[in-house]
Amino acid sequence: MYQSTRQIAHPHCVVCGADSSGGLGIQFRPVSETAVEAIVQCDERWQGYPDMLHGGVICMMLDGVMTNCIFATGVTAVTADMNVRFLHPVASSGSITLKANISDSSSMLYYLEAELIQDGKTKARATARFVKRATKMDPSADRPKQR
């Protein structure tokens, strides 16, 4: 269910899309019905300050792991709000682990938690609320109407 939901709803995603040639190319994997993770090799092109991963890239990764966590349930949703706590600098070399889980949900809202781990240490955490999309597999349903 996870792969089909992701491939249909998110083919050009800059974080995980198979059809995104300039994207990060992160491959997430479900570890339970409500959790996913990924191991990512950092790229120096993702740095802000020398030898440090850019904060915007970190946010994008955390948002991506939480989005893919929802895909594991067969649902598509969009980020309503997200809070990121940067705990330690993230080196732009080496690997990182991204983890996310659904902490709660209602009919339309999903509450998620994520973390970025490097060298066994949590370097950033995020919490977010996601809103279930208007239709599960038709991405055009969320687009504004053309005039």
Image (spheres, grey):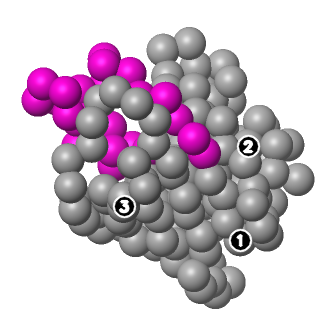
Q: Earlier in the sequence, mark 3 or mark 1?
A: 1
Q: Which mark is residue 61?
A: none
Q: Which residue is mark 1?
A: 34
Mark 2 / mark 1, whichever is N-terminal: 2
Up-down relation of residue 9 to residue 81 (above or below): above
Q: Is residue 100 visible?
A: yes
Q: Residue at x 30, y 19 (%)?
A: 44
| Residue 138 seen by the camera | no
Mark 2 or mark 3, earlier in chain: 2
| Category of crowding for the residue at label 1, using alpha-carbon neighbours closer than 10 angstroms: few (below 14), some (14–19), many (at least 20) | some
The residue carrying mark 2 is: 6
Residues at marks 3 and 1 touching, judged by CB atoms closer than 8 Å: no
The residue type indicated by label 2 comes to Arg
Compared to residue 110, the image places residue 82 above or below, namely above
Judged from the image, the secondary structure of the residue bearing numbered disc 1 is loop
The percent position of residue 92, horizontal first and vertical second, equals 29, 30
As measured in the structure, the alpha-carbon distance from the residue carrying label 3 to the one carrying label 1 is 20 Å
Horizontal and vertical percent position of residue 141:
65, 48
Residue that mark 3 sits on? 122
Q: CA distance from mark 2 to mark 3?
A: 26 Å
- As drawn, the residue found furthest toward the front would be 119
Residue 58 x/y as whole percent: 33, 44
Amino acid, disc 1: Thr
Number of numbered discs visible in the structure rendering: 3
Q: Is residue 41 left or right of residue 37?
A: left
Question: Considering only vertical position in the picture, is 139 above or below 111?
Answer: above
Nearest to the eye among marks 3 and 1: give it. 3
Q: Position of residue 130 (x, y in %)?
A: 51, 68
Specify the segment rendered in magenta: 38-61
Residue drawn at 75 percent across, 56 percent down? 30
Asked whether, in this view, residue 111 is left or right of residue 33, the answer is left
